Amino acid sequence: MTIFDQIDKIDKKNLSPLYLIYGEDEDILSEAKQKILEKIQFSSDNLSQSYIDLSESDSKFALEELESLPFFDDQRIVIYENFWDISTAKKSVFTEQELNRFEGFVDNPVDTTVLIIIVHGKLDNKRRVVKKLKQKSIVFEAVSLKESELSSHLLTLSGQMGMDISATAMKRLLEKSSFSFGLAKKNLDLLKLYKPYGEISVADLDLVLPKTLQDNIFDLTEMLLKGRIKEARSLINDLVIQGEDVIKLLSILTGNFRLYYQVKLLQKKGNSQAQITEQLKIHPYRVKLALQAVSKLSLEFLSQTIYDLINLDYQIKSGYGDKNYLFDVEVIKIALSRVK
């Protein structure tokens, strides 16, 4: 069950006294925050509801809001965001005395107040107050979604947006979004602008959605492995014109060849795609593409290419020559060595 499924179960008419939302995936956390605000029908005009950014608000005021009785409704809803004291961030909002006062509220929550805490990052599980919060709160952790969960959620979201997108097109959307929830949502918005009505096809996706830098470097890698020197140099030139630094391109290209080497090595040892995915801790789709790419490559070629790219990085950073020229020479060398 995803964090969004958990939030869907919240009943506005039967709220619990304490809710704790935390996590390191900022895109998921932001979406979860928005959904929970919608669920409780939060409004800044509602005098029985109070949102407090603890990184900006006075700590005494924050505690007073928590302890105040509702005047216009049966319950007060108080939202604390950026509660650094209970996270692993080296920051604090409350004094020790104020934190003890807050802990007293956690020990004895009142029926007339609902507290929702939103924490960006990890919780400091060593702190007594965190242990109490986790025991007494309904806890939501914002973690990255699995591919099936991400696909299911985005299909639901696209339906709510009035979009008709097939499972095949959704899979392509996830690939184009590098399986990132935040990027996939932005891409859905782009598709909605492009085609407000009708079915979204794979062709629509390829036409509308911009390529990521990682996509472009993957294409560059493929061009080099197939000896398509002219296309590879043209792509590099386009990326440089767009403002990408050669050192950054070199870093990602080196990472691609390092991944290919690892995948080839594990494949030769008899590991399956699933086993390689588990050992490398990366997305299965990346492993699938890497396995396709390395089928006709030798470990010797991959090892030498990685060595040459690392050496090129050293030369560029040591000022041996113009970085664009040195990179150009290296990509030609890789392409020629592959097609021999």
Image (cartoon, grey):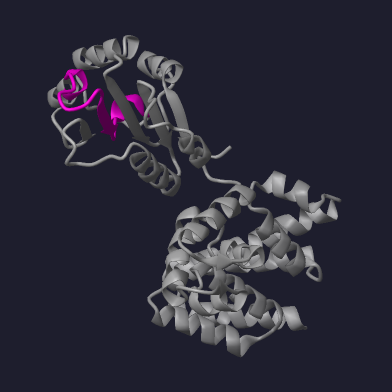
Work out whether 94 lies above or below 47.
above
User: Which residue: 55% across, 40% down?
Assistant: 2
Work out whether 127 lies above or below 286.
above
Q: Which part of the image, by quadrant, shows the C terminus?
A: bottom right
The answer to if 84 sits in the magenta stretch is yes
Q: Is residue 232 left or right of residue 142?
A: right
Nearer-the-camera pick, 249 or 67: 67
Residue 28, how many percent across, how many down?
Answer: 45, 46
Q: Is residue 33 left or right of residue 251?
A: left
> Is residue 202 visible to the viewer in this orientation of the structure?
yes
Residues in magenta, as a range? 65-87
User: Which residue: 62% across, 86% down?
Assistant: 229
The answer to if 75 sits in the magenta stretch is yes
Nearer-the-camera pick, 225 or 312: 225
Count all numbered tags in the image, as a single digit: 0
Q: Is residue 187 left or right of residue 67?
A: right
Residue 333 lies in quadrant: bottom right
Residue 140, how many percent across, how many down?
Answer: 46, 32
Q: Which part of the image, by quadrant, shows the N terminus?
A: top right
Nearer-the-camera pick, 102 or 116: 116
User: Which residue: 35% across, 16% down?
Assistant: 129
> Is residue 315 visible to the viewer in this orientation of the structure?
no
User: Which residue: 60% across, 90% down?
Assistant: 230
Residue 33 lies in quadrant: top left
Q: Residue furthest right?
A: 270
Residue 152, how many percent across, how many down?
Answer: 59, 52
Q: Residue furthest bottom?
A: 230
Work out whether 298 lies above or below 113.
below
Residue 26, how many percent across, how many down?
Answer: 41, 46
